[in-house]
Image (spheres, rainbow, N blue to C red):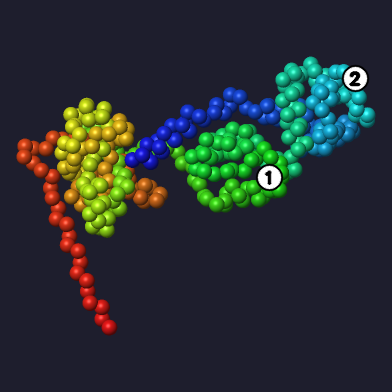
């Protein structure tokens, strides 16, 4: 039951921690938009200076994948805006290349220039070509990868501590540059685990006015499966020798259930009598039972709806209601099967 609660809390945490994807993209992504709109025609898609307009104008723009590495942000600001004294030998400012060249200081604001420089730094430090649309990649990363790899990609996502894992630091080129694009694609698609993200689909049966509670099944620490082995150990039976339906105190008050009282649980498929255990471990609206005891066969209540792909029965969620037992009625006792006698082994 605690695992179920932790799982629900985790899903809630993931939902509330999901970022506003389109609201504040990283600086380099804004820089890429500017680069694609204004710079790519001359400097080319990869920044190597082989854009179609450069060829038409018969000019030789800088290869940004190499020259940017040795330039400070201040120098890059001067080159882009054309402001200040030119100190780089052999490389004119943009507005000096041609009379028709625009004055970028009149086009870009200072934050935009700094965003553009952030993208140029990426072009200068990346060892591999850019694949696909990075903005689409950012959306996918924030939706599926961020919980482990972190907001910035350095491996500090909220799932790392919960799962005890250490994801790769994607901000460290010493780790990522050794993996080419094909290897990276293969590691994502065919890594140690194949994960298929799915959209949420509601259970086949939800609570309503007639059946206001959700019944979920869980395991107990002291018993195993249907108890055919563990229930033969007297010490275990002392610790946990009968079924109890766990009920949240709020639901117990709302439905008139007392701790230790024997109640009848009814679903659309069947009913059974079971003792109640009032505990905050079970969240409001949810009651929980194990399936270890033949005297209280929990699965006479559960749903037989099947998952459309895996064909697994939906035993963890069904709608139930509580009813009072009739006067003098006691839970039905199902006799235990006697242990099988040892058979002689033929020699």
Q: Residue at x 26, y 27 (%)?
A: 250
Left or right of 12 in this view: 51: right
Q: Are marks 2 and 1 in contact (CB under 8 Å)?
A: no
Mark 1, Cα crowd under 10 Å, few <14 / some 14-19 / many 20+, is few
Residue 169 position, x and y percent, is 64, 40
Q: Residue at x 75, y 43 (%)?
A: 127
Q: In the depicted view, which residue is nearer to us: 93 or 239? A: 239
Residue 141 position, x and y percent, is 58, 37
Q: Is residue 37 visible?
A: no
Q: Give the labeled residue for mark 1.
A: 175
Quarter of the image where one finds residue 136: top right
Q: Which mark is residue 59?
A: none
- What element does badge 2 sit on? loop
Q: Give the labeled residue for mark 2.
A: 85
Q: Residue at x 76, y 32 (%)?
A: 120
Q: CA distance from mark 2 to mark 1?
A: 39 Å
Mark 2, Cα crowd under 10 Å, few <14 / some 14-19 / many 20+, is few
Q: In the depicted view, which residue is nearer to us: 245 or 139? A: 245
Residue reaching furthest top? 106
Quarter of the image where one finds residue 129: top right
Quarter of the image where one finds residue 102: top right
- What element does badge 1 sit on? helix
Residue reaching furthest left? 328
Left or right of 17 in this view: 155: right
């Amino acid at each position: 039951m605690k695992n179920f609660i932790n799982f629900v809390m985790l899903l809630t945490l993931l939902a509330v921690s999901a970022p506003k994807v389109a609201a504040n993209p990283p600086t380099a992504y804004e820089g890429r938009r500017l680069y694609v709109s204004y710079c790519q025609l001359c400097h080319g898609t990869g920044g190597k200076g082989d854009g179609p307009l450069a060829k038409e104008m018969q000019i030789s723009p800088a290869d940004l994948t190499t020259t940017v590495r040795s330039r400070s942000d201040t120098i890059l600001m001067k080159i882009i805006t054309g402001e200040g004294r030119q100190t780089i030998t052999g490389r004119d400012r943009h507005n000096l290349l041609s009379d028709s060249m625009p004055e970028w200081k009149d086009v870009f604001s200072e934050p935009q220039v700094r965003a553009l420089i952030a993208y140029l730094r990426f072009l200068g430090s990346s060892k591999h070509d850019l694949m696909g649309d990075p903005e689409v990649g950012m959306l996918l990363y924030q939706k599926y990868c961020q919980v482990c790899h972190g907001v910035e990609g350095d491996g500090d996502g909220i799932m790392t501590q919960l799962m005890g894992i250490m994801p790769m630091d994607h901000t460290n080129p010493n780790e990522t540059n050794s993996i080419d694009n094909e290897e990276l694609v293969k590691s994502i698609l065919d890594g140690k685990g194949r994960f298929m993200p799915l959209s949420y689909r509601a259970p086949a049966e939800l609570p309503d006015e007639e059946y206001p509670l959700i019944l979920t099944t869980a395991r107990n620490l002291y018993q195993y499966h249907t108890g055919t082995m563990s229930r033969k150990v007297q010490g275990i039976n002392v610790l946990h020798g009968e079924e109890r339906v766990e009920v949240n105190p709020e639901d117990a008050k709302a439905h008139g259930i007392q701790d230790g009282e024997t109640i009848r649980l009814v679903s659309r498929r069947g009913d059974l009598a079971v003792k109640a255990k009032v505990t905050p471990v079970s969240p409001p609206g949810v009651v929980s039972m194990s399936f270890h005891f033949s005297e209280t066969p929990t699965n006479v209540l559960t749903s037989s709806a099947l998952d459309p792909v895996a064909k697994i029965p939906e035993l963890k969620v069904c709608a139930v209601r509580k009813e009072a037992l009739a006067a003098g009625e006691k839970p039905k006792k199902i006799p235990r099967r006697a242990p099988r006698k040892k058979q002689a082994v033929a020699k």
